[in-house]
Image: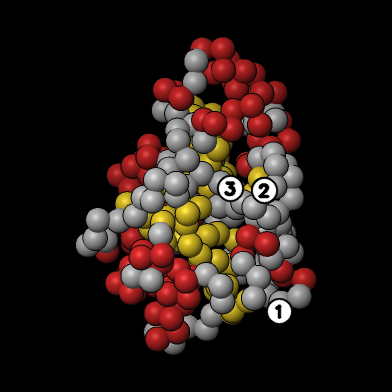
Amino acid sequence: MIFIASKSDDAGLNIAKHLEELGIRVIFTETHPVYLEYFERSMEIPSGETVVFLSRHSSAKEVKSLTVHSAGNFSTNDLGGERNFLTYTDPFLLHSILINLSNLNDTDYRVTYEATHHGPASNQKLIFVEIGSTEREYRDQHAGELVAKAILSSSPVRDESYCGIGGPHYSEKFTRMAIEEGIKFGHIASKYRFNELTENILTQMYEKTDKCKGFLIDEKSFNSKQKMELKEKLERLNFNYDFV
C-alpha cells in the first residue's frame, strides 16, 4: 500500500500522523487528492500497488462518519477526475478496512461504504479512507488513530467481489452485507445515478473492480420499469446480476 495525504486536509493529516507514529511512510502533497490527476506519472509508485488516499469527508448533514469508497465520475467531474470515467479499485482492501473500522469502532461515528464519487483520474488502483464530516471530527485524534489501526491491521482476502447498484450515497444495505455476510464491493452506484448508468459506465464498474463476479442491485431502490431497463443492459453486456 502507498499512502497519500494533502497538507491542506486536516483529516488526512490526522490519519497520516498516526500512521507515521507506527512507522509507516506517507506521501504529502500540496494538491488535494481529488485533483491529483494521473499522479502516478510524476510519483514513483509501483503499478501493482494500491494507493490509499487519506482524506476528509464532507456532509451537508454533518454526519460523524468513518468511510471507505472507490473513485470516479458517472457523469460530470465537479470534484476532479474526468467525465464518465472510473478508476481501478481494490474491493478486498476496502472490505478489510471496513470490517476493521466496524470492529474497532468505540465511538458514535457511522462506519460505512460510500458510493463511488469524485476524482482523481488515474490508471492506478486506488481507494479513499475518510473521516467526516466537520473540522471537529477531522481533528479528532482518537478517530485518526482508529482509522490508522484499521488500515494497518487489514488483511484482504482476494477471492471474489461485486459491484453494487442502488441505495443512498451512504450504502447502508451493501455495508450491512459486507459486515454480516462477508460480501466485498468495489464500485457502487447509488440509486440517484440511475440515469447515468450507460453501458460504458457499467462496463467500467465491472472491469475496474478486481475479480468482479457481477452486480448486486438493491431491488427497493427502483421501480419495475427501471429494473427491466437495468436487466436489459446487463444482459446485453453478459454481466451476471441479482436483486437483493
**What is the CA distance from the residue labelled 1 to the residue labelled 3?**
25 Å
Disc 1 residue crowd, few under 14, some 14–19, many 20+, Cα 10 Å: few
Kind of residue sitting beneath label 2: Asp
Kind of residue sitting beneath label 1: Glu
Q: Circle 3 is placed at which residue position? A: 117
| Corner quadrant of residue 8 | bottom right
**What is the CA distance from the residue labelled 3 to the residue labelled 2?**
10 Å
| Corner quadrant of residue 145 | bottom left
Return the x and y of residue 117 as percentages of the image width and height: 58, 48
**What SS does tag 3 mark?**
loop
Whether residue 147 is visible here, answered yes or no, is no
Height in image: 173 above or below 40? above
Query: Of the residues under marks 3 and 2, which one precedes in the sequence?
Result: 2
**What SS does tag 2 mark?**
loop
Height in image: 2 above or below 216? below
Q: Circle 1 is placed at which residue position? A: 44
**What is the CA distance from the residue labelled 1 to the residue labelled 2?**
28 Å
Kindly give the residue lying farthest to the right in the view shown. 41
Q: Residue at 36% of width from left, 55% of height from top?
A: 65
Q: Circle 2 is placed at which residue position? A: 78
Q: Nearer the viewer, mark 1 or mark 3?
A: 3
Marks 1/3 in contact by CB < 8 Å: the verdict is no
Query: Of the residues under marks 1 and 2, which one precedes in the sequence?
Result: 1
